[in-house]
Amino acid sequence: MEYTEVDGVKLSRLGMGNMRLPVEGGKLAGHIDAEQATAMVDFALASGVNYFDTAYIYHKGASESFLGEALSRYPRDSYHLATKFFIGANPNYKSVFERQLSKLKTDYIDFYLIHSVFDVTSKAYRSSGAIEYFLEQKERGRIGHLGFSSHMSPGMLRGFCKHHDWDFVQLQLNYDDWLFGTAREQYDIACSFGLPIIVMEPVKGGRLADLGKKANAQLREREPERSIASWGMRWLMRLPQVKVVLSGMSTLEQMRDNVATFSEAAPLSDADALLLENVCRSTHNRNVLPCTSCRYCCDSCPEHIDIPRMLALYNKMKTDGKRAMRTAARADDLTDIPATCIACGACTRHCPQSIDVPHALHKLASALR
Ligand code: SF4
Ligand code: SF4
């Protein structure tokens, strides 16, 4: 395993994200499959991974409890824990923090984050008193490093960075967002503040792990032994301010692949980076919605719609056509669901990717009529 240093702390370049743990029955919304997930934690530690990232809201709160249980079988100084406070889920930061310590079976959090700051929530976080409280906890040694995860626009990110001397930042960084989004600008801002970067969504919820038949073949021709996902990881290794790359793995196979990728310092060469960026330009479909299946929106839906599943159908319609989408919807008995959306907009307020979900569901429902 390759390692890096953040503020004198030795961290594995690969971090285990605990947002998309394996679940019973294979459905994203199900209960964590503790046996499989524990095997993944064990494999991660045995492979040298020492950074474990979770959050109050992951798996409806079950991710922290699972991780606390799984890691309690190891010495506390053999891993670093990261978790987050999300104001939208529970604004009572004091009780959230105590609950987190108890669920994670620890008396300190190594890397603590203000979670998923958007343009619209940054003010609420600033005025809540939460940041000051967590700074106090840092003084008391109950938090090692304080940072935030951002989905803000570059201007807002710059402003939030100025709030005080943050220890690190977590950003959504990948080659697709670099070329077609604002990731490059965000990276430059973090660099200008000297903030170590923890990367989230390196393969956009798995979408950059399969670029389509033709593009996959182009990359495989160049590197037959490497996975498509590994190209995204090795592209990130080119960025010096990137310290840890989080991968929200759902299977042991994905973990083995990522561990293999991070077992050597093998950033893409200039020629390979150019190849990847050209492949990305040729496959990027602006009509496809950038849903990463994070499920932040799901709990807010009064109709209990499995929103990421619906958006996957929407994207299928955009890539494979209406006919293929209808066949997939019928096979999974989903045909009537998009029409149950009452367009309340609650989901959109929680979406880090700013997706207009009701609009997409309206289009999907029309196509399924
Ligand atoms: S807009 Fe539709 S999908 Fe979104 S929360 Fe409301 S009912 Fe659910
Ligand atoms: S719609 Fe947005 S919040 Fe919901 S799963 Fe997709 S990316 Fe996440």
Image (tube, grey):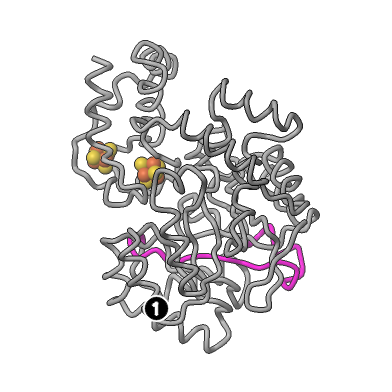
Q: Quadrant of residue 91?
A: bottom left
Q: Is mark 1 within 8 Å of ligand 2?
A: no
Q: Which residue is mark 1?
A: 131
Q: How many marks?
A: 1
Residue 174, percent from left and from top: 51, 48
Residue 79 is inside the magenta segment = yes
Residue at 54% across / 43% down in the picture? 203
Residue 298 seen from this side:
no
Residue at 54% across / 29% down in the picture? 211
- Above/below status of 321 relative to 131: above
Quadrant in the picture for the N terminus: bottom right
Residue 186 is inside the magenta segment = no
- Above/below status of 252 relative to 121: above
Residue 369 is left or right of residue 157, and the answer is left
Amino acid type, mark 1: Ile
Residue 241 is left or right of residue 5, and the answer is left
Q: Residue furthest front?
A: 271
Q: Residues within 10 Å of mark 1 (few under 14, many from 20)?
A: many
Residue 186, percent from left and from top: 42, 60
Dividing the image into four quarters, tell me where ligand 2 lies.
Answer: top left
Q: Nearer the viewer, residue 279 or 333?
A: 279
Quadrant in the picture for the C terminus: top left
Residue at 39% across / 63% down in the picture? 86
Residue at 52% across / 83% down in the picture? 138
Q: Nearer the viewer, residue 1 or 241?
A: 241
Q: Quick one: SS at disc 1?
A: helix
- Above/below status of 93 relative to 199: below
The magenta segment:
68-89
Residue 238, percent from left and from top: 62, 54
